[in-house]
Image: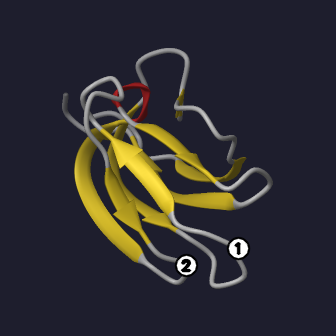
Amino acid sequence: MAKANPIAQTTTLTGTYAALSATRFLCRRVTLGCPPSNAGDVTISLDGGATGVTRPPGWWSTYDWLDLSAVQVKGTVGDELQIDGTTGGPT
């Protein structure tokens, strides 16, 4: 079993979809969160931007086995999406 490594990053949003990772980056468990200080909603897409789910400031959710390269986000320019979790483990 691979060692679990912590990850913690903040992504600054733009008005167009951008992937959370340019290459495959599998997380064993990851929490995505929209800080309450964001000015607007964050739109999250798992299908290349064809459809998206809008989440308000203060929202957060935890996922198991999420590939960050498959997640695209957009929102109010300058707002943030926080990403906290662990990598590693069986794939």
For this view, does 25 lie left or right of residue 61?
right
Q: Nearer the viewer, residue 58 or 7?
A: 58
Q: Amino acid at mark 1?
A: Ala
Query: In this rendering, would 66 be left or right of 25?
Result: left
Residue under pointer 2: 57
**Residue drawn at (55%, 70%), measured in percent from left and top?**
34
Using the image, determine if residue 62 lies above or below residue 69: below
Please identify the quarter of the rendering in which residue 31 is found.
bottom left
Instruction: Give the class, few, some or many, for how many residues have Cα within 10 Å of label 2's Cα (few <14, many ≥20).
Output: some
Residue at x 52%, y 84% (from the top left corner): 58
Q: Quadrant of residue 47?
A: top left
Q: Amino acid at mark 2?
A: Pro
Residue at point 27%, 35% (across, down): 46
Contact, mark 1 vs mark 2 (Cβ under 8 Å): yes
Real-space Cα separation, disc 1 to disc 2, in angstroms: 7 Å
Residue 39, compared with residue 2, is above or below; it is below
In the image, residue 45 sits, relative to residue 83, either above or below, namely above
Q: Position of residue 37 (x, y in %)?
A: 72, 82
- Considering depth in this image, is 91 or 51 the residue closer to the camera? 51
Question: Residue 39: which numbered mark, if any?
Answer: 1
**Number of residues whose C-alpha sits closer than 10 Å to that of mark 1, classed few (under 14), some (14–19) or many (20 or more):** some
